[in-house]
Amino acid sequence: MTAAPPLWKASIVVAKEQAGDISAAFELGTSPQAVLIHEEPFKPDAVVEALYTQMPDGDLLSKLAGRAVHVQLLPDTDWIKLSQQGLPPVRAGRFFVYGAHDAGTVPKGVIPIRIEAGMAFGTGHHETTSLCLGALSDLSKRKRYDNVLDLGCGTGLLAIGAAKLWRKKVLASDIDPVAVEITRENAAANGESTLIHAIAADGLASPALAAKAPYDLIIANILAGPLTQLAPSIARALGKGGALILSGLLTWQENLVLSFYRPFGLILRETRRDGPWTALVLERPGGGSYSRR
């Protein structure tokens, strides 16, 4: 596996009730590799940490937090993977997402997905990821999707989920080559390497992504900014009767993101929320889609 790049950590101590807002502000404003919240049961404060592969803008982080944020270069250790080793498994829809330390706890009647995050984002613990898994699970009750794209795949969790639901080939792309490599590793660990094709690509302008269009399901769990910028290309790549899952946005950004997709004839079918986070399920009319089987 490719050596991990140096890792920077930005950290701040805040009251527990403020930790969620600070975490959301860091994710929205600075595109970290991961944001972690550390709490102790009987203490009033929490520590919010954001991890980056390049030195972040400390002044911007402090402005977002409303107070000074400490930035430091970490030793050559895979801190994301280390921090996630103690995380509990996640249930989302039909899925059960777990790490190696929980391999003996998989219950019956679920779709198990083993994810070792390494340097990529997406273990199912973040609200946006679990919201997307729930949306995928519900979509599988209504229709089959044969041509799926996971745009901004991270660890490949959502691509693996789609492959397990429909047993069809899934194209997974990410701008980060490390994420693409981790997606391939996770796909192999879950027995889905023949169904998941992971590539490094910057948006849908990539010839490899354009060649597979139109898609009948696109999953884009990225931030609101990229979702609005990519709206024309995402909409053009979605076929008639196709479904679109958008996440990585906060509840107050719902109308903003929708305003970029509705002009292309896409219809909002469902809004899923968890805390400050949202996932939107949209559809392009035609093809008899969104009807229950």
Image: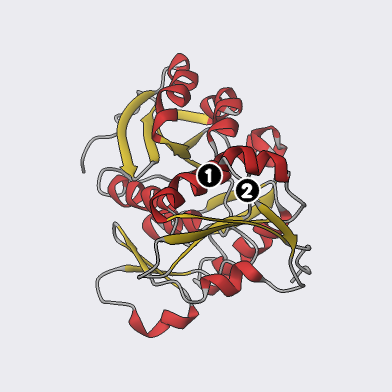
**In the image, is residue 99 above or below residue 179?**
below
Residue 158 vertical position relative to residue 119 in the rendered view, above or below = above
In the image: residue 250, left or right of residue 272: right
Q: How many numbered marks are there?
A: 2
Pointer 1 residue:
149
In the foreground, 64 or 140: 64
Inspect this view and state whether residue 176 appears. yes
Q: Is 234 located above or below residue 26 in the figure?
A: above
Residue drawn at point x = 60 percent, y = 71 percent: 81
Point out residue 62 in the picture as x, y percentages from the top left corner: 64, 43
The label on residue 173 is 2
Residue 130, disc: none
Disc 1 residue type (three-letter): Leu
Name the residue located 52 percent from the left edge and 76 percent from the top edge: 85
Mark 1 secondary-structure assignment: strand
159 or 38: nearer the eye? 38
What amino acid does circle 2 point to? Answer: Ser
Towards the viewer: 107 or 60: 60
Query: Label 1 crowding class (10 Å Cα cut-off): few <14, some 14-19, many 20+?
Result: many
Of pointers 2 and 1, the one earlier in the residue sequence: 1
Considering the image in quadrants, where does the C terminus appear? top left
Pointer 2 and pointer 1: residues touching (CB < 8 Å)? yes
Q: Residue at x 47, y 75 (%)?
A: 99
Q: Residues within 10 Å of mark 2 (few under 14, many from 20)?
A: many
